[in-house]
Amino acid sequence: MSLIVYKIIAAFIIFIVTLIAVFYPIRAKAHLHHDHHLLDFGDAFASGVFLGAALFHMLPEASHHFAQSIPNFHYPLAGLLCACGFLLLLFLERLSLSKNKNYATIPYVLGIIIIVHSLIEGTVLGINTDFSTLSVIFLAILAHKGSEGFALSLTLSRATLTITPIAILIGIFSFMTPLGILMGAITETVFNTKETQLLTAGFNAFAAGTFLYMSTLHHINHHQRLHEAESLLEFFCLLAGVTVMALVAGLA
Protein backbone atom coordinates (compact mmCIF):
# COMPACT_ATOMS: atom_id res chain seq x y z
CA MET A 1 0.00 0.00 0.00
CA SER A 2 1.39 3.42 -0.97
CA LEU A 3 1.84 6.17 1.60
CA ILE A 4 -0.81 8.44 0.08
CA VAL A 5 -3.43 5.66 -0.02
CA TYR A 6 -2.68 4.86 3.62
CA LYS A 7 -3.25 8.51 4.58
CA ILE A 8 -6.49 8.73 2.59
CA ILE A 9 -7.85 5.60 4.28
CA ALA A 10 -6.78 6.92 7.68
CA ALA A 11 -8.50 10.27 7.04
CA PHE A 12 -11.72 8.53 5.97
CA ILE A 13 -11.79 6.20 8.99
CA ILE A 14 -11.12 9.07 11.41
CA PHE A 15 -13.88 11.14 9.78
CA ILE A 16 -16.43 8.32 10.11
CA VAL A 17 -15.50 7.58 13.74
CA THR A 18 -15.78 11.29 14.54
CA LEU A 19 -19.24 11.59 13.00
CA ILE A 20 -20.51 8.55 14.90
CA ALA A 21 -19.05 9.86 18.15
CA VAL A 22 -20.56 13.36 17.87
CA PHE A 23 -24.01 12.37 16.65
CA TYR A 24 -24.79 9.65 19.20
CA PRO A 25 -25.15 11.90 22.28
CA ILE A 26 -27.29 14.41 20.37
CA ARG A 27 -29.56 11.65 19.11
CA ALA A 28 -29.84 10.34 22.66
CA LYS A 29 -30.57 13.90 23.91
CA ALA A 30 -27.41 13.72 26.05
CA HIS A 31 -29.21 12.87 29.32
CA LEU A 32 -26.54 10.32 30.14
CA HIS A 33 -24.88 11.20 33.39
CA HIS A 34 -23.69 8.04 35.11
CA ASP A 35 -24.03 5.14 32.68
CA HIS A 36 -20.92 5.54 30.59
CA HIS A 37 -18.16 4.18 32.78
CA LEU A 38 -16.89 1.99 29.96
CA LEU A 39 -16.56 5.04 27.73
CA ASP A 40 -14.63 6.85 30.48
CA PHE A 41 -12.31 3.88 30.91
CA GLY A 42 -11.81 3.74 27.15
CA ASP A 43 -10.97 7.43 27.15
CA ALA A 44 -8.44 6.85 29.93
CA PHE A 45 -6.80 4.12 27.85
CA ALA A 46 -6.72 6.47 24.85
CA SER A 47 -5.12 9.18 27.00
CA GLY A 48 -2.45 6.68 27.93
CA VAL A 49 -1.88 5.98 24.24
CA PHE A 50 -1.46 9.74 23.61
CA LEU A 51 0.91 10.08 26.56
CA GLY A 52 3.02 7.15 25.40
CA ALA A 53 3.00 8.30 21.77
CA ALA A 54 4.28 11.73 22.83
CA LEU A 55 7.02 10.46 25.15
CA PHE A 56 8.21 7.31 23.37
CA HIS A 57 7.74 8.23 19.71
CA MET A 58 7.12 11.85 18.81
CA LEU A 59 9.54 13.72 21.09
CA PRO A 60 12.50 11.34 20.55
CA GLU A 61 11.93 11.36 16.77
CA ALA A 62 11.65 15.16 16.73
CA SER A 63 14.93 15.49 18.63
CA HIS A 64 16.59 12.99 16.27
CA HIS A 65 15.41 14.82 13.13
CA PHE A 66 16.49 18.20 14.50
CA ALA A 67 19.95 16.78 15.29
CA GLN A 68 20.24 15.42 11.74
CA SER A 69 18.96 18.52 9.96
CA ILE A 70 20.79 21.17 12.01
CA PRO A 71 23.71 19.34 13.68
CA ASN A 72 25.44 22.52 14.85
CA PHE A 73 22.34 23.81 16.65
CA HIS A 74 22.43 22.46 20.22
CA TYR A 75 19.41 24.18 21.78
CA PRO A 76 16.65 21.72 22.91
CA LEU A 77 14.26 22.94 20.22
CA ALA A 78 12.02 19.86 20.46
CA GLY A 79 11.45 20.53 24.16
CA LEU A 80 10.67 24.19 23.50
CA LEU A 81 8.07 23.40 20.82
CA CYS A 82 6.57 20.69 23.02
CA ALA A 83 6.16 23.23 25.83
CA CYS A 84 4.55 25.67 23.37
CA GLY A 85 1.97 23.08 22.31
CA PHE A 86 1.19 22.23 25.93
CA LEU A 87 0.89 25.88 26.98
CA LEU A 88 -1.28 26.82 23.99
CA LEU A 89 -4.01 24.37 24.96
CA LEU A 90 -3.63 25.24 28.65
CA PHE A 91 -4.08 28.93 27.76
CA LEU A 92 -7.20 28.21 25.71
CA GLU A 93 -8.76 26.22 28.51
CA ARG A 94 -7.89 28.76 31.19
CA LEU A 95 -9.38 31.44 28.93
CA SER A 96 -12.77 29.80 29.39
CA LEU A 97 -12.60 30.49 33.14
CA SER A 98 -11.16 34.02 33.04
CA LYS A 99 -14.26 35.89 31.88
CA ASN A 100 -15.80 36.18 35.35
CA LYS A 101 -16.47 32.45 35.22
CA ASN A 102 -18.90 32.88 32.36
CA TYR A 103 -19.80 29.21 31.92
CA ALA A 104 -21.75 29.97 28.75
CA THR A 105 -18.42 30.33 26.95
CA ILE A 106 -17.04 26.96 28.08
CA PRO A 107 -18.61 24.89 25.25
CA TYR A 108 -17.07 27.23 22.66
CA VAL A 109 -13.63 27.21 24.26
CA LEU A 110 -13.71 23.43 24.67
CA GLY A 111 -14.65 23.23 20.99
CA ILE A 112 -11.72 25.49 20.03
CA ILE A 113 -9.29 23.42 22.12
CA ILE A 114 -10.35 20.14 20.52
CA ILE A 115 -10.51 21.67 17.01
CA VAL A 116 -6.97 23.10 17.28
CA HIS A 117 -5.69 19.80 18.65
CA SER A 118 -7.45 17.85 15.86
CA LEU A 119 -5.88 20.01 13.15
CA ILE A 120 -2.41 19.62 14.66
CA GLU A 121 -2.65 15.85 15.06
CA GLY A 122 -3.93 15.46 11.49
CA THR A 123 -1.06 17.59 10.14
CA VAL A 124 1.46 15.46 12.02
CA LEU A 125 -0.02 12.30 10.53
CA GLY A 126 -0.05 13.80 7.03
CA ILE A 127 3.52 15.09 7.07
CA ASN A 128 5.15 11.90 8.38
CA THR A 129 6.62 9.45 5.85
CA ASP A 130 7.50 6.49 8.06
CA PHE A 131 4.85 3.75 8.13
CA SER A 132 5.57 2.69 11.72
CA THR A 133 5.32 6.28 13.00
CA LEU A 134 2.18 6.85 10.94
CA SER A 135 0.58 3.73 12.40
CA VAL A 136 1.35 4.77 15.98
CA ILE A 137 -0.05 8.28 15.46
CA PHE A 138 -3.09 6.94 13.60
CA LEU A 139 -3.91 4.52 16.43
CA ALA A 140 -3.46 7.26 19.02
CA ILE A 141 -5.77 9.62 17.11
CA LEU A 142 -8.36 6.92 16.47
CA ALA A 143 -8.35 5.75 20.09
CA HIS A 144 -8.98 9.29 21.35
CA LYS A 145 -11.25 10.59 18.59
CA GLY A 146 -14.38 8.70 19.61
CA SER A 147 -14.35 9.74 23.25
CA GLU A 148 -13.15 13.26 22.37
CA GLY A 149 -16.03 13.74 19.93
CA PHE A 150 -18.48 12.22 22.40
CA ALA A 151 -17.32 14.62 25.14
CA LEU A 152 -17.63 17.65 22.85
CA SER A 153 -21.07 16.65 21.64
CA LEU A 154 -22.23 15.91 25.19
CA THR A 155 -21.06 19.34 26.37
CA LEU A 156 -22.73 21.14 23.45
CA SER A 157 -25.99 19.22 23.94
CA ARG A 158 -26.19 20.08 27.63
CA ALA A 159 -25.44 23.77 27.00
CA THR A 160 -28.14 26.27 26.09
CA LEU A 161 -27.07 26.50 22.46
CA THR A 162 -29.23 26.57 19.35
CA ILE A 163 -28.80 23.96 16.65
CA THR A 164 -26.81 26.33 14.37
CA PRO A 165 -23.70 26.84 16.57
CA ILE A 166 -23.78 23.15 17.55
CA ALA A 167 -23.85 22.11 13.88
CA ILE A 168 -21.03 24.56 13.00
CA LEU A 169 -18.75 23.36 15.81
CA ILE A 170 -19.42 19.70 15.07
CA GLY A 171 -18.88 20.22 11.34
CA ILE A 172 -15.56 22.00 11.87
CA PHE A 173 -14.41 19.40 14.40
CA SER A 174 -15.28 16.50 12.08
CA PHE A 175 -13.27 17.93 9.17
CA MET A 176 -10.24 19.21 11.10
CA THR A 177 -8.20 16.00 11.32
CA PRO A 178 -8.78 14.99 7.66
CA LEU A 179 -7.94 18.60 6.67
CA GLY A 180 -4.76 18.41 8.74
CA ILE A 181 -3.80 15.13 7.04
CA LEU A 182 -4.29 16.79 3.64
CA MET A 183 -2.24 19.83 4.65
CA GLY A 184 0.55 17.64 5.98
CA ALA A 185 0.59 15.44 2.87
CA ILE A 186 0.77 18.49 0.57
CA THR A 187 3.55 20.01 2.69
CA GLU A 188 5.52 16.76 2.56
CA THR A 189 5.16 16.69 -1.25
CA VAL A 190 6.02 20.35 -1.94
CA PHE A 191 9.13 20.81 0.21
CA ASN A 192 12.49 19.12 -0.25
CA THR A 193 13.81 16.37 2.02
CA LYS A 194 15.63 18.59 4.51
CA GLU A 195 12.77 21.08 4.79
CA THR A 196 10.27 18.24 5.21
CA GLN A 197 12.44 16.69 7.92
CA LEU A 198 12.54 19.98 9.81
CA LEU A 199 8.79 20.52 9.45
CA THR A 200 8.09 16.95 10.55
CA ALA A 201 10.32 17.39 13.59
CA GLY A 202 8.63 20.70 14.44
CA PHE A 203 5.10 19.37 14.09
CA ASN A 204 5.96 16.22 16.03
CA ALA A 205 7.42 18.22 18.92
CA PHE A 206 4.57 20.76 19.01
CA ALA A 207 1.92 18.06 18.73
CA ALA A 208 3.64 16.05 21.47
CA GLY A 209 2.91 18.99 23.77
CA THR A 210 -0.78 18.97 22.81
CA PHE A 211 -0.87 15.18 23.28
CA LEU A 212 0.68 15.57 26.74
CA TYR A 213 -1.88 18.21 27.67
CA MET A 214 -4.88 16.23 26.41
CA SER A 215 -3.71 13.10 28.26
CA THR A 216 -2.99 14.83 31.58
CA LEU A 217 -4.56 18.15 32.61
CA HIS A 218 -7.41 18.03 30.09
CA HIS A 219 -8.18 14.43 31.03
CA ILE A 220 -8.19 15.25 34.75
CA ASN A 221 -10.36 18.35 34.31
CA HIS A 222 -13.02 16.52 32.32
CA HIS A 223 -13.02 13.17 34.11
CA GLN A 224 -13.44 13.97 37.77
CA ARG A 225 -14.24 10.81 39.70
CA LEU A 226 -16.59 10.68 42.68
CA HIS A 227 -15.65 7.14 43.70
CA GLU A 228 -12.12 6.16 44.61
CA ALA A 229 -12.45 2.68 43.08
CA GLU A 230 -13.47 4.12 39.70
CA SER A 231 -10.60 6.59 39.84
CA LEU A 232 -8.13 3.75 40.42
CA LEU A 233 -9.58 1.72 37.54
CA GLU A 234 -9.33 4.73 35.27
CA PHE A 235 -5.68 5.16 36.24
CA PHE A 236 -4.91 1.53 35.38
CA CYS A 237 -6.61 1.99 31.99
CA LEU A 238 -4.36 4.99 31.35
CA LEU A 239 -1.36 2.95 32.50
CA ALA A 240 -2.34 0.20 30.05
CA GLY A 241 -2.34 2.71 27.18
CA VAL A 242 1.13 3.96 28.13
CA THR A 243 2.37 0.37 28.41
CA VAL A 244 1.12 -0.48 24.91
CA MET A 245 3.02 2.49 23.44
CA ALA A 246 6.13 1.55 25.41
CA LEU A 247 5.97 -2.00 23.99
CA VAL A 248 5.48 -0.65 20.47
CA ALA A 249 8.54 1.59 20.94
CA GLY A 250 10.57 -1.40 22.11
CA LEU A 251 9.59 -3.44 19.05
CA ALA A 252 10.15 -0.62 16.53
Image (spheres, rainbow, N blue to C red):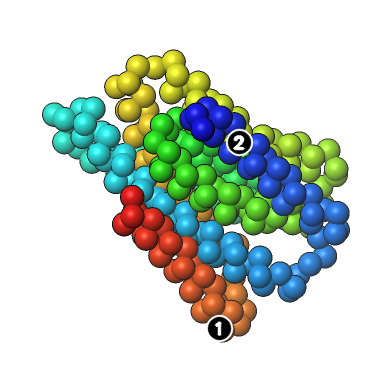
Residue 163 position in % (x across, y down): 85, 43
Mark 2 sits on what residue? Answer: 9
Residue at the location (51% across, 79% down)?
A: 232
Q: Residue at x 60, y 75 (%)?
A: 225
Q: Position of residue 5 (x, y in %)?
A: 56, 30
Image side of residue 156 versus residue 118, left or right: right
115 vs 26: above or below: above
Is disc 1 surrounded by few (<14), some (14 to 19) or many (20+) residues within 10 Å? Answer: few
- Between marks 1 and 2, how big is the CA–CA gap? 41 Å
Query: Reading the chain from its start, which is encountered first: label 1 or label 2?
Result: 2
Amino acid on which the number 2 mark rests in the picture: Ile
Q: Please tell me whether mark 2 sits on a helix, a strand or a loop.
A: helix
In percent of the image, x 23 and y 27: which residue is there? 69
Residue 244 lies in quadrant: bottom left
Residue 114: image tag? none
Question: Which residue in the rendered view is the most extreme toward the front?
Answer: 1
- Residue 198, compared with residue 174, is above or below; it is above
Q: Which residue is mark 1?
A: 228
- Dot 2 surroundings within 10 Å: few (below 14), some, or many (20 or more)? few
Residue 189 percent across, percent down from the top left? 45, 19
Q: Is residue 209 visible?
A: no
